[in-house]
Amino acid sequence: MLIFFLGSVSSCSWFTDQEDGASKEAAANTYAKLGTEYLRMGQMNVALEKLRLAIELDDNNIEAHDSIAVLYEQIKEYPKARQHFEAALSLRADSPATLNNYGRFLCDRGEYEEAFEYLHKAMAMPLNDNKWYAFTNAGRCELMRGDQNKAEQYFRQALEYQANYAPALLELQRISYRNNNYMSAKAFLQRYLEVAEHTPGTLWVGIQTEIALGNRELALQYRRILLEKFANTKEAKQIQATLPSSSTNPSNN
């Protein structure tokens, strides 16, 4: 699950060449906000068109560079993504959104040391009102390089800034389960479900957690949800073998 935050759309008015008094900068801002919103909605082609127009009109538009970098990352055009992340940072080196996004991007490329430089800058910025994004990305980065203890610390710090941040709660559910802290895993899942919907992963870990706690009825309930809503996933196929719906004793993974 990619974690990124972008500028919110404050206006959905369209710019036209005939709009009296509109400057290129104002038009670029409008296109950048439109492109960002289309990116949020997953309409990649339209988003790319608007963001390109924004940059053509104003190559100094930070939001356009940051958003188009995220878009290129999502469509796996990584060199272009890197180019635009660096362009955004050259324009504003203290942009929390870009620092976070670029740090996550570098971590996904395996460039861990440089990734943490950017993520730590985003964490340390006094004016960053969304620090939980950077802490969560840092936690995931630590998981990728194999340090679960440091990862857990980052996820818990993320929750200090945003107690109901679903991605951090999700990761802590998994870590708690792997550490055999089943009551903790159960608690993190309950908190997660207050703000987000089940995924195949949350259900699989939930099933295994309830088996470990001896709560077969709830484990079977999670099993039914997994098989009904996510029947074609690897988790559903795996659980059919490890937890039969009959009265026989379930396997305990």
Image: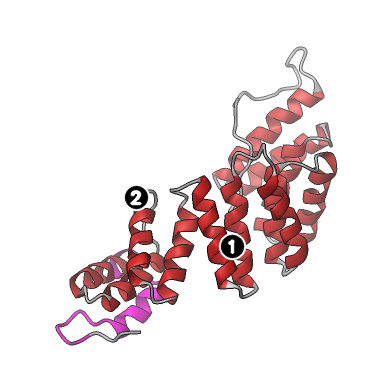
Q: Nearer the viewer, residue 142 or 77?
A: 142
Image quarter of residue 81: bottom right
Q: Which residues are magenta?
A: 227-249
Which of discs 2 and 1 lies nearer the camera? The answer is: 1
Inspect the image, locate mark 1, and give the three-letter code of the amino acid beneath it. Answer: Gly
- Residue sitting nearer the eye, 52 or 181: 181
List the single residue furthest toward the left: 247
Where, by quadrant of the figure, is residue 231 drawn?
bottom left
Q: The C terminus appears in which quarter of the rendering? A: bottom left
Residue 192: x %, y % from top left:
39, 55
In the picture, measured across the screen, residue 139 lies left or right of residue 221, that is right
Residue 212 forms part of the magenta stretch: no
193, above or below 46, in the image: below
Q: Is residue 230 magenta?
A: yes
- Helix, strand or loop at mark 1: helix
Task: Please say if 109 is above or below 48.
Answer: below
The disc placed on residue 194 is 2
N-term mark: 2 or 1: 1
Question: So how many labels did they put on this image?
Answer: 2
Does 194 sit left or right of 29 as displayed? left
Q: Is residue 211 visible?
A: yes
- Residue neighbourhood size for the residue with mark 1, other residues' Cα within 10 Å, grouped as few (<14), some (14–19), many (≥20): many
Circle 2 crowding by C-alpha within 10 Å: few under 14, some 14–19, many from 20: few
| Mark sitting on residue 23 | none
Identified at 20% across, 79% down, the residue is 245
Residue 139, which numbered label? Answer: 1
